[in-house]
Image (cartoon, rainbow, N blue to C red):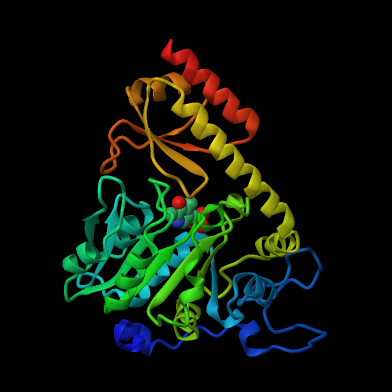
Amino acid sequence: MSIQQLVRPNIQALLPYSSARDEFTGNGEVFLDANENPFETEVNRYPDPYQRAIKEKLAPIKGVSPSQIFLGNGSDEAIDLIIRIFCEPGQDQIIISDPSYGMYQVSAGINNIEVIKVPLTENFEFSAKEMLGAVQDKTKVAFLCSPNNPSGNSLDTSEVEEFIKSFQGIVVVDEAYIDFASTPSFTDKLDTFPNLIVMQTFSKAWGMAGLRLGMAYASEEIISLFNKVKPPYNINTLTQKAALEALNNEAKVKQEIQIILEQREWLKEQLSAISITEKIFPSDSNFLLVKFQDAKGLFDFLIEKEIIVRDRRKVRFGENCLRITVGTADENKKLITAIKTYQK
Ligand SMILES: *Cc1c(COP(=O)(O)O)cnc(C)c1O
């Protein structure tokens, strides 16, 4: 399979915008090339369009080369660009597991791309065979989410690998929650599978959802397609600065992850001792999908107590399920105390 054959013809033919900062790299002293205001503030200059400093730091952490990284305005931007690079509106399709993260479908809808949904099992397990069986001629991109949102579990690695091997299109593995998982990242497999894109984000474990910074890792060939299509200055100066600071302080994030994992186990124990809890689904992430006897009643009660969890009763196999993010020890105690009050 050739990647170029999967790319939309208009994107193949596109001559990308060339910015002032594209056309000059090196050591300038006087910058009169970009019509900026010359009076110095933190943000009077355009940012680095390729975020080189961040990629230099991130690459060794992730075991990839800087040329295998795309940075976007949240994972949302990566999802949208992937669809726009590979899927012809009104003609091509994406394929996704169900239930899964809602943005794949929304982004496909905005781009007038049909979505094929393949159910996971009732325990939210993924089968390569099931999904391959649902693929059609015009299915260009598959989105798999592992650990999966909203169920929390990692998809079986060998099933995912089998799918990537057999599918004749692009496979996106969304690893937004990988830092909480016991399974290794698929970034290790980028050199094995030329059709693989791995997405991660600064929004969850890295603690910077407000920054809007997502990563996609792929072959240099695919990353150059992202660079061709993205808005030239898609990551602003302040975001780049904050991300660099965070990358210089990785130890702090690792510590926080450890605390969140301990708290996840504590929450699991506490919830399983509560009689209205019917089932706690296995989690490799920073949240728990929990089935209760009366999820709607509990959900409303918690809102009265100003504790907000996510109602997931309407997703496939999510009957009577609430999705609970692991908070601080104090927040988690408040939640458990409130649930105990409700059940009395
Ligand atoms: C939270 C989440 C993201 C993160 O999206 P951002 O736009 O980077 O904040 C991506 N994928 C999944 C499955 C998520 O749950």
What residue is rendered at 25% in x and 50% in y? 121
Query: Does residue 95 show up?
Result: yes
254 in relation to 73, above or below: above
177 in relation to 331, above or below: below
How many numbered discs? 0
Of all residues, the one furthest to the top in this rendering is 344
Using the rendered view, name the quadrant where residue 109 is placed: bottom left
Q: Which quarter of the figure is the N terminus placed in?
A: bottom left
Q: Which quarter of the figure is the C terminus placed in?
A: top left
Q: Give left or right: position of 179 versus 80.
A: right
Q: Give left or right: position of 35 versus 182.
A: right
Judging depth in this view, the residue of 79 and 338 nearest the camera is 338
Q: Position of residue 250 (x, y in %)?
A: 71, 59
Q: Give left or right: position of 230 versus 58.
A: left
Q: Give left or right: position of 21 versus 265.
A: right
Judging depth in this view, the residue of 129 and 24 nearest the camera is 129
Judging depth in this view, the residue of 183 and 79 nearest the camera is 183
Using the rendered view, name the quadrant where residue 155 is placed: bottom left
Using the rendered view, name the quadrant where residue 330 is placed: top right
Query: Does residue 306 show up?
Result: no
Judging depth in this view, the residue of 332 and 314 nearest the camera is 332
96 in relation to 258, above or below: below
Q: Position of residue 319 (x, y in %)?
A: 27, 34
What residue is rendered at 36% in x and 62% in y? 144
